[in-house]
Image: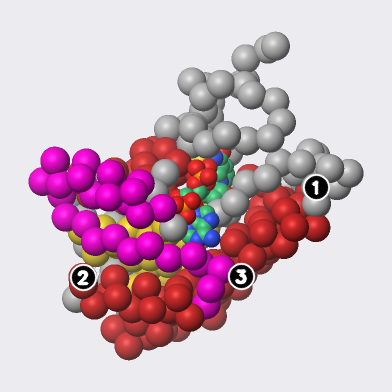
Amino acid sequence: MKVIITGASKGIGRGIASYLAMDGHEVGLLARSEDLLEDLQQSIRDQNGESHAVSCDLRDPEATRTAVDWLVEQMGHCDGFINNAGLVIRKDIFDISMEEWHAMMDTNVNGLFYATKAILSHFQRQGRGHLINISSISGKLPLAGGSAYAASKHAVTGLSLSLFQECRDHNITVSTIYPGSVASQSPRHGEDTGESWKVAPEDVGRVCRDILSADPRTTISEVEIRPLGRPPKS
Ligand SMILES: NC(=O)c1ccc[n+]([C@@H]2O[C@H](COP(=O)([O-])OP(=O)(O)OC[C@H]3O[C@@H](n4cnc5c(N)ncnc54)[C@H](OP(=O)(O)O)[C@@H]3O)[C@@H](O)[C@H]2O)c1
């Protein structure tokens, strides 16, 4: 399959892209950091995988459409599109700034919406496609110490579950993944509990593979993936 992943330069997105590429899929990679995308492409090449990459800031709707169109053109068509890019700022209402609120909403909600509009025009033309949205457990439950992040992820969930209904008659599946703590290696505000107990990014990739390879008469519409263990006691 040919699959585009946003936020592929690091963390969960890199894990998804690496897993899918090693599973034999051709991957389209989108993020802002050109150097990190080049590094991932080299690693995929080293393992005889195939990839295409474009640098793009998802907060810009025109740039997003141009980047998505370019990737689809490079790949010939697109079977799956994974909205993974996101900004995680774990601060409570007393500490978070207006700028941080807007940056998170612009990335997690507006950016995801722009990318979705861009790929759905291709899926509509093709008459098929799989859209996978990475929400969060914080897109279902409250997150004390991360209220603004939770608000942005609840928006992703609401959009994604509604899109499932809007798209199914167009032969387009929409799936929502709710990860718990994933070892994305990216620095976060708040307590540092280490990474060893968390879900590996590649395991989110395995979930995406399973969604993409479901029987065409079936759709895996929602998946929660959490670590079995708990954070170490401090
Ligand atoms: N880690 C967790 O425990 C966890 C749990 C549940 C859900 N999630 C969700 O999983 C997704 C990935 O999280 P992560 O932990 O892997 O985060 P991360 O390590 O910080 O990676 C975020 C990715 O998004 C990209 N990105 C951010 N802003 C962007 C923008 N404006 N335009 C284009 N790309 C942008 C980044 O690339 P550039 O900086 O190169 O642009 C990077 O590739 C997010 O949606 C997050 O909410 C994470």
The one of 125 and 93 positioned closer to us in this rendering:
93
Lateral position of residue 57 relative to residue 155, left or right: left
The type of residue carrying mark 1 is Ile
Cβ(mark 1) to ligand 1 < 8 Å? no
Q: Which of marks 2 and 1 is nearer the N terminus?
A: 2
Depth check, mark 3 against mark 1: the one in front is 1
Residue 171 visible here = no
The percent position of residue 232, horizontal first and vertical second, equals 62, 14
The type of residue carrying mark 3 is Asn
SS at circle 3: helix
Residue 27 visible here = yes
Q: Is residue 221 above or below residue 89?
A: below
Depth check, mark 2 against mark 1: the one in front is 1
| Category of crowding for the residue at label 1, using alpha-carbon neighbours closer than 10 angstroms: few (below 14), some (14–19), many (at least 20) | some
Q: Give the range drawn in magenta.
A: 33-61
What is the residue that sits farthest to the front in this orientation?
35
SS at circle 2: helix
Q: How far apart are marks 2 and 1 (CA)?
A: 40 Å
The one of 215 and 207 positioned closer to us in this rendering:
207
Q: In this view, does 18 lie above or below 129?
A: above
Residue under numbered circle 1: 96
The type of residue carrying mark 2 is Met
Lateral position of residue 99 relative to residue 224, left or right: right
Residue under numbered circle 2: 75
The percent position of residue 227, horizontal first and vertical second, equals 53, 29
| Residue 47 belongs to the span the image colors magenta | yes
Q: Do the residues labelled 2 and 3 touch (CB within 8 Å)?
A: no
Lateral position of residue 173 relative to residue 51, left or right: right
Q: Residue 110 carries which label?
A: 3
Q: Which residue is drawn at 71% across and 41% down?
A: 90
Q: Which residue is drawn at 64% across and 65% down?
A: 106
